[in-house]
């Protein structure tokens, strides 16, 4: 997840424990932030305190990466954004084509070729009541920034994860399939991981099965096959998750979506996490247990390599070529 440092620069989570992502380098020129059709300097990029995105976490978002001048899996991210908005009855006040153009233009305005773009759609300005009927027009915010990955060494060494007490919400509460601005469930889990000095929090659903981590999907490898929890277990339909399905098909590795328990993870040969910010990253220790031989496994390593190749070679061009 991206957060902001005191200066307002986009940064990855604070490096409190080893393996946490480090603060980003500043963009090459002053950051330009898109709000509802206009670009603002960092200091002037402001929205109303009556926006329900702020008052109630009422809105949806996407975190999208671009590599080497191309937006990775842009269409899938946009599709998910529009689906999240539709699910919570937010009408995005522009066409899909125009929003695509605004996203690309924001990256161009910031003169970046590699980075992360946060696309936010809030319910818009209303009054202090929660009724969204008060909000006449949703707002669109687009922020492009440089991103720092976990240090390269962590992609070899792997992450330490703990199971937390906070359960992932079920689809009957706030469906985890909606990528909404309401992340308190994940944040509470993240706080538990921080307090345990772990890199990430493993979240279970109410049935006790693995759902996901706070901003990543979970994968295990057992006897040469890849497994990941189904969406119905409370996992976001991750875009990186879907790339792993493509890679598995390409490499001829069987992949399936059974319900998984912590036991399955403890006895896995390999495990890894996927997410737009973290990419594909090994998980080598869970709840004090060593996974497999405690190092990034062969299938994980091949998946990381192929993922990186795809990020370098595919995507929607940002600049005219
Ligand atoms: C809760 C949650 N699960 C999983 C993911 C991974 O999804 P993606 O690969 O689309 O970034 C994210 C990040 O977007 C997330 O916030």
Image: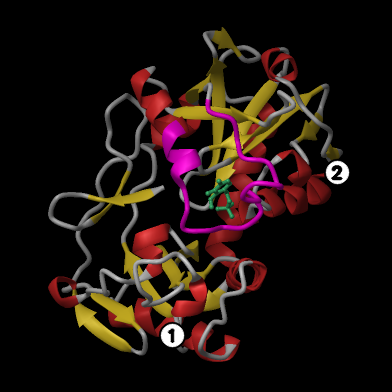
Q: Is residue 216 left or right of residue 199?
A: right
Say if 211 sits above or below 207 in the image: below
Q: Position of residue 39 (x, y in %)?
A: 27, 85
Q: Which mark is residue 102?
A: 1
Q: Which residues are magenta?
A: 166-188
Say if 128 sits above or below 234 in the image: below
Q: Is residue 167 magenta?
A: yes
Instruction: Report the residue at 48% width, 40% height from top.
Output: 186
Q: How is the image coloured?
A: secondary structure
Q: Is residue 50 left or right of residue 101?
A: left
Magenta segment main secondary structure: loop
Viewer-nearest residue: 135 or 321: 135
- Figure quadrant of residue 286: top right
Instruction: Report the residue at 48% width, 34% height from top.
Output: 155
Q: Is residue 99 left or right of residue 261?
A: left
Classify 10 Å Cα crowding around label 2: few (below 14), some (14-19), many (20 and above): few
Instruction: Report the residue at 83% width, 49% height from top.
Output: 249
Viewer-nearest residue: 82 or 256: 82
Q: Position of residue 201 (x, y in %)?
A: 50, 28
Q: Is residue 114 visible?
A: no
Q: Position of residue 128 (x, y in %)?
A: 34, 67
Instruction: Report the residue at 27% width, 37% height from top.
Output: 14
Question: Element at badge 1?
Answer: helix
Question: Element at badge 2?
Answer: loop
Q: Position of residue 208 (x, y in %)?
A: 71, 23
Q: Is residue 157 magenta?
A: no
Q: Are marks 1 and 2 in contact (CB under 8 Å)?
A: no
Q: Which residue is label 2 attached to?
A: 252
CB at disc 1 and ligand 1 closer than 8 Å: no
């Amino acid at each position: 997840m991206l957060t902001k440092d005191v200066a307002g620069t986009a940064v990855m989570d604070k490096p409190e424990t080893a393996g946490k992502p480090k603060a980003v380098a500043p963009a090459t020129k002053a950051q330009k932030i898109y709000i509802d059709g206009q670009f603002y300097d960092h200091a002037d990029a402001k929205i109303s305190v009556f926006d329900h995105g702020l008052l109630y976490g009422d809105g949806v978002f996407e975190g999208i990466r671009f590599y080497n001048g191309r937006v990775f899996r842009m269409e899938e991210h946009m599709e998910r954004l529009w689906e999240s908005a539709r699910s919570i009855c937010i009408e995005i006040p522009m066409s899909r084509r125009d929003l695509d153009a605004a996203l690309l233009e924001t990256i161009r305005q910031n003169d970046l070729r590699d980075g992360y773009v946060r696309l936010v759609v809030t319910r818009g300005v209303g009054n202090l009541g929660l009724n969204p009927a008060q909000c006449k027009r949703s707002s669109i915010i687009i922020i492009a920034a440089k991103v720092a990955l976990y240090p390269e060494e962590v992609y070899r060494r792997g992450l330490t994860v703990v199971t937390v007490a906070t359960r992932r919400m079920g689809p009957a509460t706030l469906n985890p399939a909606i990528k909404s601005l309401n992340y308190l469930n994940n944040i509470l889990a993240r706080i538990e991981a921080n307090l345990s000095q772990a890199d990430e929090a493993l979240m279970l659903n109410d049935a006790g099965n693995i759902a996901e981590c706070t901003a990543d999907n979970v994968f295990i490898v057992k006897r040469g096959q890849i497994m990941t929890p189904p969406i119905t277990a409370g996992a976001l339909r991750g875009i990186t998750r879907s790339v792993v399905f493509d890679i598995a098909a390409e490499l001829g590795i069987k992949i399936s979506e059974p319900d998984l328990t912590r036991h399955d993870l403890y006895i896995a040969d390999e495990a890894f996490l996927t997410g737009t910010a973290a990419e594909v990253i090994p998980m080598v220790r869970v709840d004090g247990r060593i996974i497999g031989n405690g190092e990034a496994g062969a299938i994980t390593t091949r998946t990381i390599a192929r993922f990186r190749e795809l990020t370098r070679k595919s995507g929607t061009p940002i600049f005219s070529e």
